[in-house]
Amino acid sequence: MINKESLLRGVKAVTPLMLGVIPFGLISGISAANTGLSIGMTMLMSIGIFAGAAQLASLQLISINANMIVIIYTALIINLRMMLYSLSIAPHIQKLNTKWKALLAYSMTDQSYAMSSVHFMNNPEEDTKSFFFGASISIWIIWQISTVVGYLMGSIIPPELGLDFGIPLTFIAVLLKGVAGWPGVIAIITSGIVAVLASQLPMNIGLVLAAIIGITAGALSERILSKKSEVSENE
C-alpha cells in the first residue's frame, strides 16, 4: 500500500526542481519536432527511454543521420550513471517485490534519486517506496507534459529565448543538494575538469572517464581525511 503522506513528501521534495525539468522537456519536444519525428514517435521515445540527456543526444545524432549503433551506444553511455544510482539506492528498496522494483527503476531520475537518497539518510523511518515513487512519478508526469507542449510549439519558440538554461540549472540544483563534505566537493570538481578535458574524445567516452575518476577521487579523499581524523583523535 502507498503511504499518502510519504508520497506527498516525495512530490514536495522535487517540486523546486520542476523549474529546471520543464524547459528541459520543452527542449526535448522542440528538438524532436525539428528533427522530423511524429508526435507518436516522440512520445514513444519520451515514455520508453525517459532520460532527458540521452533523448537529446539521440535526437541530435538522428538529425545528422548517425549510424544506429552509434545512437544506441551514446544513449547507453550517458545512462551508465543510472547503474551507480541503482547500487546506491538498492539497500532502501531491497525488501520490495519485483514489480515495485521494476517500476521504481524505470521512473527513477537524477532528481528523484538525489532527493530520495539524501532524505533516506536523514529520515531512516520514512516509507521509502512511497517517497521514492512520489518523487519519481511527479517528475515523469511533468516531463511527458512538457515534451508534448514542446513538440506542439515546435519552431514557434525562438532559439534566442535560451530555454536550454534549464538543463544545467537542474543538475546544479541536484548536485548542491547531495554534496556532503569535502569528498563530495572534490569528486564534483574532479569529474567536471575531466569531463571538460575529455569532451572531444570519441563516442562520449569522456563522460564515463569523468564519472570513474571523479568517484575515485572522492573515495580516496574520504579515506585520507578519515585517517587524518583518526590520527588527530589519537594524539
Image (cartoon, grey):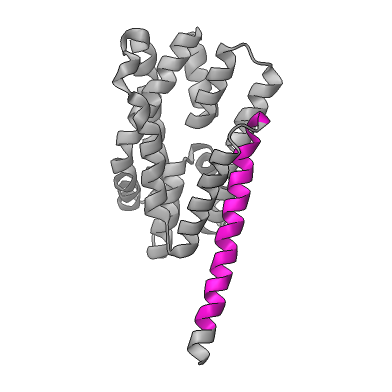
In this rendered view, identify the residue nearer to me: 97 or 175. Answer: 175
In this rendered view, identify the residue nearer to me: 21 or 195. Answer: 195
Query: Is residue 225 rendered magenta in the image?
Result: yes
Residue at the image position 58 percent from the left and 55 percent from the top: 215
Total numbered labels? 0
Q: Position of residue 95 (x, y in %)?
A: 55, 57
Residue at the image position 64 percent from the left and 44 percent from the top: 209
Q: Is residue 88 above or below residue 208?
A: below
Q: Residue furthest bottom?
A: 235
Query: Is residue 14 rendered magenta in the image?
Result: no
The answer to whether residue 42 is left or right of residue 66 is left
Q: Position of residue 44 (x, y in %)?
A: 52, 19
Q: Main secondary structure of the magenta part?
A: helix
In this rendered view, identify the residue nearer to me: 177 or 190. Answer: 190
Query: Which residues, given as a range, are shown in magenta?
Result: 202-230
The answer to whether residue 46 is left or right of residue 152 is right
Residue at the image position 69 percent from the left and 16 percent from the top: 67
Q: Is residue 158 above or below residue 186?
A: above
The answer to whether residue 170 is left or right of residue 214 is left
Q: Position of residue 162 (x, y in %)?
A: 32, 23
Q: Is residue 3 visible?
A: yes
Q: Position of residue 165 (x, y in %)?
A: 35, 30
Q: Quadrant of residue 141?
A: top left
Q: Residue furthest front?
A: 197
